[in-house]
Image (spheres, rainbow, N blue to C red):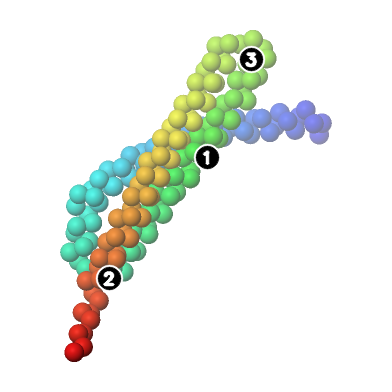
Amino acid sequence: MPMFELSQALRATVELLLVPTLLALGVLLVAALFELGSLLGERFHGLRALAQNADPERALALGHRRIERADLITRAGPMLGLMGTLISLGPGLEALARGDVARLAGQVTIAFDTTVVGLCAGIVGFLAGRLRRRWYGDLVDALERADAPEPRRVG
């Protein structure tokens, strides 16, 4: 198989990835918005309810799951945004070579949009993860202090 045919096959394969990448970015953006709502709920109600249950292990397990979810969004958002950017720039550069400015503009718009959406999702995930690490760490510390026996006074 000549090199030209291989490069065409590779280009076609990469272009097929654009739609799944855009769909994944959409799902990730919805997940980031869910995280934002969940974060507000935790801050104003959820952590208080966990503190009343006084179970440090349950709070720690729940915190780990929620932090992992935020970390996934933090990492996947920018990666998918970059994929969308690079995938759409290939056809854009081909359009530029042919002088098709309208197609170039459309592809560059997709490139910028996917970058912005990916970074927005990543920012939400990053903030959610950082805040949750602090909140759940403080909660577990407080629960463990409450469970600790009072020190005996000697003398």
> Left or right of 26: which side holds 33?
left
Decide which of tag 3 and tag 2 comes sooner along the chain. 3
Q: Residue at x 48, y 43 (%)?
A: 76
Splitting the image into 4 quarters, where does residue 64 fall? bottom left
**Whether residue 21 is visible:** no
Which amino acid type is marked by label 3? Leu
Count neighbours of disc 2 (C-alpha within 10 A) and say few if under 14, some if 14 to 19, many if 20 or more: some
Cβ atoms at labels 2 and 1 below 8 Å apart: no
> Left or right of 28: which side holds 81?
right
Cβ atoms at labels 3 and 1 below 8 Å apart: no
Decide which of tag 2 and tag 1 comes sooner along the chain. 1
Residue 96's tag is 3
Q: In which quarter of the image is the N terminus?
A: top right
Residue 144's tag is 2
Q: Which residue is drawn at 49% across and 38% down?
A: 78
How far is disc 2 from disc 1 in space, using C-alphas? Answer: 38 Å
Q: Residue furthest right?
A: 2
Which amino acid type is marked by label 1? Met
Q: Position of residue 109 (x, y in %)?
A: 50, 21
Q: Report which residue position mark 1 lands on.
A: 79
Which amino acid type is marked by label 2? Glu
- Camera-near label (3 vs 2) is 2
How far is disc 3 from disc 1 in space, using C-alphas? Answer: 25 Å
Foreground pick, 27 / 56: 56
Q: Where is residue 121 in the image (x, y as percent from the top left)?
A: 41, 38
Splitting the image into 4 quarters, where does residue 46 fall? bottom left
How far is disc 3 from disc 2 in space, using C-alphas? Answer: 63 Å
- Camera-near label (2 vs 1) is 2
Q: What element carries label 2?
A: helix
Decide which of tag 3 and tag 1 comes sooner along the chain. 1
